Image (spheres, grey):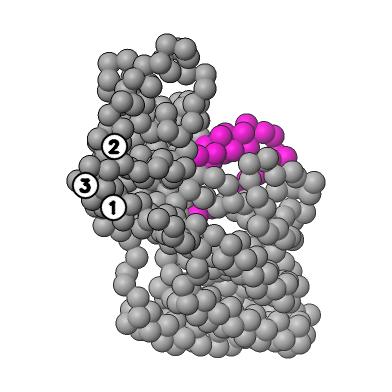
């Protein structure tokens, strides 16, 4: 039988399911099948189809007692000397999960995620990095008129384009993802464009009247920007209470003080910004709640080598083993966002004994971080895009894609370097 299939993870899983169903029919008819490079059969199916395989495995153990030579067939189906399926460890983990483990995962609701999200989430997160850079910019006493608004908009669209290219090579990108990102991108371009025009004209003129040390409204704007950047690192941007920020501007910030012209210019400019964002956030929140289901706040990943001693490590407290899979794989549950990043960085300290097999049913992990000029990516990582940090420092932000099974090694290597290494911003969690 010949068939055409996609190479994305979802297509491979679908083929594996109907292949096992087909093999049951083949075996019920007294037949067997050609052993392809995709080992979708369970061990029980393999043993029924090839009852003399035990003799072949016995010869292999005799001539190669240290298992120096191997391939997918041996890794999937060869028993140990006692005839049992050997437990998987990090040092010698098969290239793919065996059918028995896959069937266990297929029964779990919300486990699988679309692989394209691992790439395209970066475009949305680029706005988080820009917001954080803007908060740091204001907190450092820099003038709002000098912030690179236009360049920040450009970094979003370049990130979107680069991530979409990388994702589409491996899987289809849902139309809803494009709609969401285009709405975000266009609204951000409008916001930053208007802000750039205002700050470079009326805002810059009012800066000339600013007293030494700035005005209270600027300090308040810096706090609001920092609170906003902290919230959108773990929640949707429209969940931020711009109406509360507007109310605080008029109730918590003194109406009088040094630099009255600059004070009132900032007060009215910020009032207009917060009011418009409050109304727009309400509209987006209503539209989102009607069009999308609430996302899960945890993700699950499969690892080899996990044991109870690791569970007692305080740095790994966010990781919870929810199931033990076939041949000793562990299914771990991890909270999203910052706890996800911190847990994986902590787990990388054990990279010699623990290895990721897959994340949310996929074999690719992406991450972003700041690197100095001249930084060279690890050999196993692919740079999807790179661009200057909006905060003005002499650093570049890079988006890397790498096999999930290599993630802990890469994190451990980068963590062991000096300041010239990768400072991880975020590990994307699908």
- The CA distance from mark 3 to mark 1 is 11 Å
In this rendering, is residue 16 above or below 159? above
Sequence order check, earlier mark of 3 and 1: 1
* Residue visible at 76% across and 83% down in the picture: 200
In this rendering, is residue 300 above or below 3? above
Q: Residue 295 got which mark? A: none
Q: How many marks?
A: 3
Residue 179 image point, x, y percent: 50, 80
Check disc 1 and report the residue beneath it.
22
Does dot 2 land on a helix, a strand or a loop? Answer: helix
* Residue visible at 62% across and 51% down in the picture: 400
The quarter of the displayed image where residue 217 is located: bottom right
The quarter of the displayed image where residue 422 is located: top right
Check disc 2 and report the residue beneath it.
49
* Residue visible at 35% across and 39% down in the picture: 98
Q: Residue 29 got which mark? A: 3
Between marks 3 and 1 in the image, the one whose residue lies nearer the viewer? 3
The reply to whether discs 2 and 3 touch (Cβ–Cβ < 8 Å) is: no
Q: Nearer the viewer, residue 350 or 114?
A: 114
Q: Which residues are magenta?
A: 405-428
User: In the image, is residue 199 part of the stretch drawn in magenta?
Assistant: no
Relative side of 10 to 408, left or right: left
Relative side of 224 to 101, left or right: right
Does dot 3 land on a helix, a strand or a loop? Answer: loop
């Amino acid at each position: 039988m010949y068939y055409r299939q996609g190479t994305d993870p979802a297509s491979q899983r679908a083929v594996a399911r109907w292949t096992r169903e087909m093999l049951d029919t083949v075996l019920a008819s007294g037949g067997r099948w050609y052993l392809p490079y995709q080992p979708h059969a369970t061990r029980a199916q393999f043993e029924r189809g090839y009852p003399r395989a035990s003799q072949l495995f016995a010869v292999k153990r005799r001539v190669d007692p240290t298992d120096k030579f191997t391939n997918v067939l041996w890794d999937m189906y060869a028993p140990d000397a006692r005839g049992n399926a050997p437990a998987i460890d990090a040092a010698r983990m098969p290239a793919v999960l065996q059918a028995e483990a896959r069937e266990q995962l297929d029964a779990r609701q919300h486990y699988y995620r679309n692989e394209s999200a691992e790439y395209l989430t970066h475009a949305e997160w680029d706005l988080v990095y820009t917001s954080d850079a803007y908060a740091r910019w204001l907190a450092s006493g820099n003038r709002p008129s000098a912030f690179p608004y236009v360049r920040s908009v450009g970094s979003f669209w370049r990130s979107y384009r680069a991530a979409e290219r990388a994702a589409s090579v491996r899987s289809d990108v849902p139309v809803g993802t494009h709609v969401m990102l285009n709405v975000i991108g266009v609204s951000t371009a409008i916001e930053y464009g208007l802000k750039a025009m205002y700050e470079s004209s009326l805002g810059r003129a009012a800066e000339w009247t600013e007293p030494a040390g700035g005005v209270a409204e600027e300090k308040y704007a810096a706090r609001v920007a920092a609170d906003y950047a902290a919230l959108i690192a773990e929640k949707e941007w429209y969940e931020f209470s711009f109406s509360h920020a507007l109310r605080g501007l008029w109730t918590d910030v003194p109406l009088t003080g040094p630099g009255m012209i600059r004070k009132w210019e900032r007060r009215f400019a910020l009032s207009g910004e917060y009011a418009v964002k409050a109304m727009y956030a309400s509209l987006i929140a209503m539209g989102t709640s009607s069009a999308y289901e609430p996302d899960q706040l945890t993700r699950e990943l499969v690892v080899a080598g996990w044991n109870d001693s690791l569970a007692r490590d305080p740095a790994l407290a966010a990781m919870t083993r929810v199931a033990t899979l076939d041949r000793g794989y562990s299914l771990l549950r991890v909270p999203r966002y910052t706890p996800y990043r911190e847990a994986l960085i902590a787990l990388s300290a054990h990279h010699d004994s623990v290895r990721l097999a897959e994340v949310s049913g996929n074999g690719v992990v992406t991450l972003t971080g700041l690197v100095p000029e001249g930084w060279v990516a690890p050999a196993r990582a692919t740079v999807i895009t790179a661009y200057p940090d909006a905060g003005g420092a002499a650093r570049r932000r890079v988006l890397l894609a790498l096999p999930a099974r290599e993630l802990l090694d890469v994190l451990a290597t980068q963590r062991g370097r000096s300041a010239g290494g990768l400072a991880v911003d975020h590990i994307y969690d699908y």
